Image (cartoon, coloured by chain):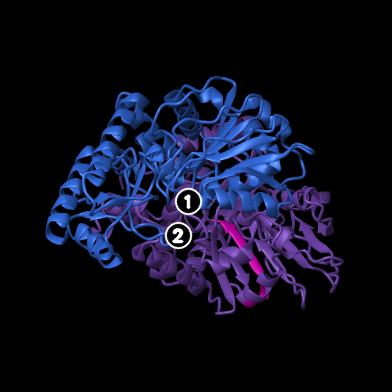
Chain colours: A purple, B blue
Amino acid sequence: MENRVYNFNPGPATLPLSVLQTIQEELLNYKGEGLSILEMSHRSKTFDKIVDDAMDAVKKVMGFGDDYTVLFLQGGATAQFAAVPLNLALPGKPALYVNTGSWSKKAIAEAKKLSIEPTVIASSEDQNFNYIPTSFEIDPNASYLHITSNNTIFGTQWQEYPKTGDVPLVADMSSDLYCRRFDPNQFALIYAGAQKNAGPAGVTIVIVRNDLLERSHDDIPTILNYKIFAEKKSLYNTPNCFGIYVVGLVMQWILDQGGIDKVEAVNRKKAELLYQTLDSTDFYRPTARPDSRSIMNVTFRLPNEDLEKQFVAEAAKNGMVGLKGHRSVGGIRASIYNAMPLEGVEALVQFMKEFERKNG
Amino acid sequence: MENRVYNFNPGPATLPLSVLQTIQEELLNYKGEGLSILEMSHRSKTFDKIVDDAMDAVKKVMGFGDDYTVLFLQGGATAQFAAVPLNLALPGKPALYVNTGSWSKKAIAEAKKLSIEPTVIASSEDQNFNYIPTSFEIDPNASYLHITSNNTIFGTQWQEYPKTGDVPLVADMSSDLYCRRFDPNQFALIYAGAQKNAGPAGVTIVIVRNDLLERSHDDIPTILNYKIFAEKKSLYNTPNCFGIYVVGLVMQWILDQGGIDKVEAVNRKKAELLYQTLDSTDFYRPTARPDSRSIMNVTFRLPNEDLEKQFVAEAAKNGMVGLKGHRSVGGIRASIYNAMPLEGVEALVQFMKEFERKNG
């Protein structure tokens, strides 16, 4: 295993070892072409196939149909916080947001900055974002409703997506796309920085329903214009070629695991194991409300901050890294994305029990 | 040599073999940390050092001082076409552009799209962009003057940069940054997609004089805001971590070659060899005016298009790929960036002579 650690970082995050090995093997000479994927023209037939295959797989894994277009963009969720209102907000039709944590807040702030006044229809800020709001009204005249499907910092995740009727549902799925099955047709637009379940940092996956593309005006920065990038199959300009290649490999890895249902089953098992451990003691205190718990980021506290520091340090010594909670909230966070093997979580649970025994 | 070809593609382009080998060696386990650079948190100490070192090297290679800040952004030149006017245009002070080809035109069109009316003070469109204009007036009241330092499609390159006095000089150096020495203090802002001389596609290098940062308003998309990214040392959000890492390796490679002067000397030798070959016969017809020739992209025609097709195909059979001219102009283009070894150009010249002998 090349002395690799169990990497619980929230993103960039652990990738499947077999994917890394493929990258390594192909790095100097991609499939006998005599050059690296890093050196390959984005206008070559070979790269065309890499993009096409990656786009197809992005849709295939979740079952998106022909009425959706995949875009490979740059700039992460931060770029999408601007792109969504710039492309999708219609005059006189409010842009709705649910505020479930730091990333929602950034999305809301960005719309405001760009003079597209956001309407926050629900928020869990009253309880320090430890839950997902479930009761709110959706103005049927809205331009769209934006949600953050998983909140890495607070360890919460939408368990069921809101029914929005004709209002386009837009989701920032940066940290949980491909963790579980959902009905793709609920969504008008999904975006995700790839660096959790789908690849390396530097490539953003956008899946957009084709009718939404007609909203893109000509007066927004080209780099943020969905329609232009859709028309050019994401090759309007030079994309992050390497990142797209890795996304394609990760999608193939999901299919090789048996598809999204198999990956979800393992994810649920990993999360259950951790939450059971947390719930079986008072030493560890999970922070998310049980009905809102994330199966991707499990957040919890120890009796005090000194113990938390010690926990993170000792875990690292035992080959488990990246467990420190986000600096804005403290505590512990175990990010258990798709590529974290069950054995990694078993090792963490073992360590947690041992740590409690010694320090409880 | 792993059966590698000579890669004359205009970008993404050839990279130093030693850099690729380092990436390959470190890919599964970065310096014994037990994880890949592709899996590493952008908030880790290790990555902090990678960014710091890369930023330092980006400045060191060209001699930029403390009054300049390096940004690693995403979105390529296309994003910068928007970012430059959005950040730097001041009310009542014209945004000046020199039009030297397709990329200049895109920069100009993007400013117009964003309602920052560009003033084109010179153009070489009258001669199908086969030269760089040298006589034009610069309004001393201008917000900035934007130039494209090297024109990949037309094979032209500024030989001397314009003297702009107090008007900030902004240059798109995507295809020739690091090909030769220049006085860094001439420039207020330089940007470059990394995928020619500096790394892989997906990371954009911006070098900006610090006083310019004060122009960034709060009402432009965060992802395009120079000031915000400068304040956060390019880590406002998750960057293209891998791309930055590779840029750092390429900068170190330049230093290992003996620095920019040594790299320039090899580049001039390669270009001379090619232009001499072109000038010594009527079979090949260089397209750029001699006083405007690029040392990065050498463009030429053959007696007819059939011969050009044959040339590209036969060269590829002989292990020299990427020689087809841009689809908008046709012909042949040999892109000979830093990482193209002299031997590659010698092999090409040999092939050209042989091809002429057979078909001339």
Q: Is residue B156 above or below residue A230?
A: above
In the rendered image, is residue A183 in sight? no
Label 1 marks a residue whose chain is B
Q: Position of residue A68 (x, y in %)?
A: 58, 74
Residue that mark 2 sits on: A247
The one nearer the camera, B336 or B80, is B336
Disc ID at residue B96:
none
The one nearer the camera, A118 or B303, is B303
Q: Which residues are magenta?
A: A185-193
The one nearer the camera, A24 or B325, is B325
Q: Is residue B125 above or below residue A84?
A: above
For the residues carrying marks 1 and 2, which lies nearer the camera in this image?
1
Q: Is residue A187 magenta?
A: yes
In the rendered image, is residue B49 in sight? yes
| Residue at x 18% of width, y 60% of height | B317
Q: Is residue B308 magenta?
A: no
Element carrying mark 2: helix
Quadrant of the image containing the C terminus of chain A: top right
Q: Position of residue A115 (x, y in %)?
A: 82, 52
| Residue at x 66% of width, y 61% of height | A149
User: Label 2: how many residues lie within 10 Å, few (<14), some (14-19) or many (20+)?
Assistant: many
The quarter of the picture where residue B331 lies is bottom left
Position of residue B221 in the picture relative to residue B271 (left or right)? right
Identity of the amino acid at label 1?
Gln
User: Label 1: how many residues lie within 10 Å, few (<14), some (14-19) or many (20+)?
Assistant: few
Label 2 marks a residue whose chain is A
Identity of the amino acid at label 2?
Val
Residue that mark 1 sits on: B127
